Image (spheres, grey):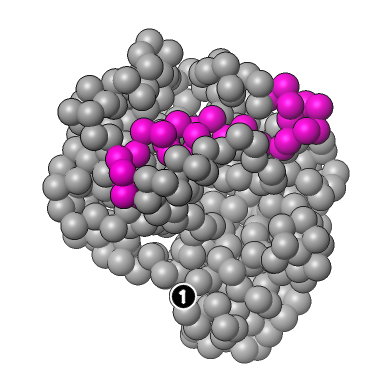
């Protein structure tokens, strides 16, 4: 089959690789009908994620048609069923899965020891996201093996397009969790750093959950325009000081909640500290660039919540924990436990409360994937979200 494969920093190729096979009775094989490039894939493209190997198949936002199931077919899946697959892999039976903390599954990462050495504890396995997180082949391919498929899927009802449901695999639940973390009761002001795909879903999810105002922060004109279409007020950080503007907009109090939808690759041009972070990362004195996290902490009102869904990979430097502690901030963060959210979000799509296809700007085939990684990373051609049809 054809698949997008990692061969080093900035080197993605469309290769021919072996077809996946059933390896466990709870497996299924799907023919991929749609997949996508995620912002967190760019951390692989830019060389920030350790334990990648040349030839690894990428991709963790995937859906398709069932072509084969293992002998322990607990979900009763049939050939031809359309399913969306979460980006995390979870067994459904361990201590954490029983608590709906699916992204912390104790069984799905066969390389848990490697991850524990780096992180102190192992998260669940992830599709197409390094050997530290399981070494699973990803879904930017013609076919995908889905372990624990009885847990790790949602069946697509008739009448919904791939475009409407594909993002149930990751970015819609992630943006929704970002807002859900803020414990919104109605009437709040939420500030969101990053108007990429996850940030766009966080904007709309915050409104769905009762926020009165959403203030979105970015510098890319197309992203800011899409945020405004979703009802957000916007701040262009290249033209205004974010802290000063948020203080002005909230009468000196600060937002009730701040969402970091950027993570480890904050734009080094956004501030002096972000530029220093990049230089230190190059010298291996730290690994991540937490400018957005620092700013979210300083901007959040006393007693407010900071919600982190932007990916962080390693070590952070100069995070103002004294400010956070003394002002009573709450931090909430996680890799998204996607199965917890898939059903309720599918219901919102069916009811017409949201159409997730709004975020798609580019549709391509697998052969165009390597070029689209660069286009997406560099925000060329108005690119916000790339959907791939193998």
- Seen as rendered, the residue at the extreme top is 239
Q: Residue 249, how many percent across, how many down?
A: 21, 26
Magenta stretch: includes residue 290: yes
Q: Residue 359, how many percent across, how many down?
A: 37, 37
- Occupied quadrant, residue 90: bottom right
In the image, taking residue 212 as reference, residue 134 lies left or right, namely: right
- Seen as rendered, the residue at the extreme right is 54
In the image, taking residue 127 as reference, residue 7 lies left or right, namely: right
Pick the residue in front: 63 or 182.
182
Say if 181 sits above or below 224 in the image. Answer: below
Q: Residue at x 53, y 71 (%)?
A: 102
Mark 1, secondary structure of its residue: loop
Q: Residue 279, how many percent across, how many down?
A: 72, 22
Q: Residue at x 55, y 77 (%)?
A: 96
Q: Residue at x 19, y 46 (%)?
A: 188
Reading the image, the residue beneath label 1 is 100
Say if 103 sits above or below 68 in the image. Answer: above
Pick the residue in front: 196 or 178.
178
Pick the residue in front: 309 or 20.
309
Say if 219 sits above or below 355 in the image. Answer: above
Q: What segment is highlighted magenta in the picture?
A: 278-306
User: How many numbered circles does the render carry?
Assistant: 1
Magenta stretch: includes residue 293: yes
- Occupied quadrant, residue 364: top right
Res. 7 visible in picture = yes
Q: Residues within 10 Å of mark 1 (few under 14, many from 20)?
A: some
Res. 77 visible in picture = no
Q: Residue at x 59, y 53 (%)?
A: 60
Q: Residue 40, how many percent across, how many down?
A: 59, 42
């Amino acid at each position: 089959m054809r698949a997008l494969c990692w061969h080093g920093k900035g080197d993605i190729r469309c290769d021919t690789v072996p077809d996946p096979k059933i390896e466990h009775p709870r497996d299924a094989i799907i023919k991929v009908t749609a997949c996508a490039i995620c912002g967190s894939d760019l951390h692989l493209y830019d060389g920030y994620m350790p334990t990648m190997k040349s030839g690894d198949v990428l991709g963790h936002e995937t859906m398709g048609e069932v072509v084969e199931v293992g002998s322990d077919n607990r979900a009763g899946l049939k050939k031809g069923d359309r399913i969306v697959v979460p980006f995390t892999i979870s067994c459904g039976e361990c201590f954490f899965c029983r608590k709906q903390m699916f992204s912390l599954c104790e069984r799905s990462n066969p390389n848990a020891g490697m991850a524990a050495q780096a992180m102190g504890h192992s998260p669940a396995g992830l599709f197409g996201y390094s050997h530290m997180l399981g070494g699973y082949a990803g879904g930017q391919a013609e076919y995908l093996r889905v372990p624990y498929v009885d847990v790790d899927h949602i069946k697509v009802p008739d009448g919904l397009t791939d475009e409407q449901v594909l993002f149930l695999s990751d970015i819609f639940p992630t943006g929704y969790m970002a807002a859900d973390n803020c414990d919104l009761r109605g009437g709040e002001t939420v500030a969101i750093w990053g108007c990429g795909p996850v940030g766009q879903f966080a904007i709309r999810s915050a409104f769905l959950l009762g926020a009165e105002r959403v203030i979105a922060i970015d510098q890319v004109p197309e992203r800011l325009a899409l945020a405004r279409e979703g009802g957000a007020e916007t701040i262009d950080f290249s033209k205004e000081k974010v802290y000063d503007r948020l203080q002005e907009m909230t009468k000196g109090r600060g937002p009730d909640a701040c969402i970091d939808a950027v993570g480890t690759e904050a734009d080094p041009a956004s501030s002096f500290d972000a530029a220093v972070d990049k230089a230190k990362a190059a010298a291996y004195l730290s690994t991540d660039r937490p400018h957005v996290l620092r700013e979210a902490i300083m901007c959040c009102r006393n007693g407010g919540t900071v919600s982190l869904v932007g990916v962080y990979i390693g070590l952070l430097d100069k995070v103002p924990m004294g400010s956070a502690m003394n002002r009573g901030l709450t931090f909430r963060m996680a890799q998204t436990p996607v199965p917890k959210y898939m059903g309720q979000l599918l219901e919102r799509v069916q009811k017409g409360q949201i159409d997730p296809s709004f975020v798609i700007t580019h549709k391509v085939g697998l052969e165009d994937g390597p070029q689209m990684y660069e286009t997406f990373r560099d925000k060329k051609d108005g690119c916000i979200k790339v959907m791939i049809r193998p």
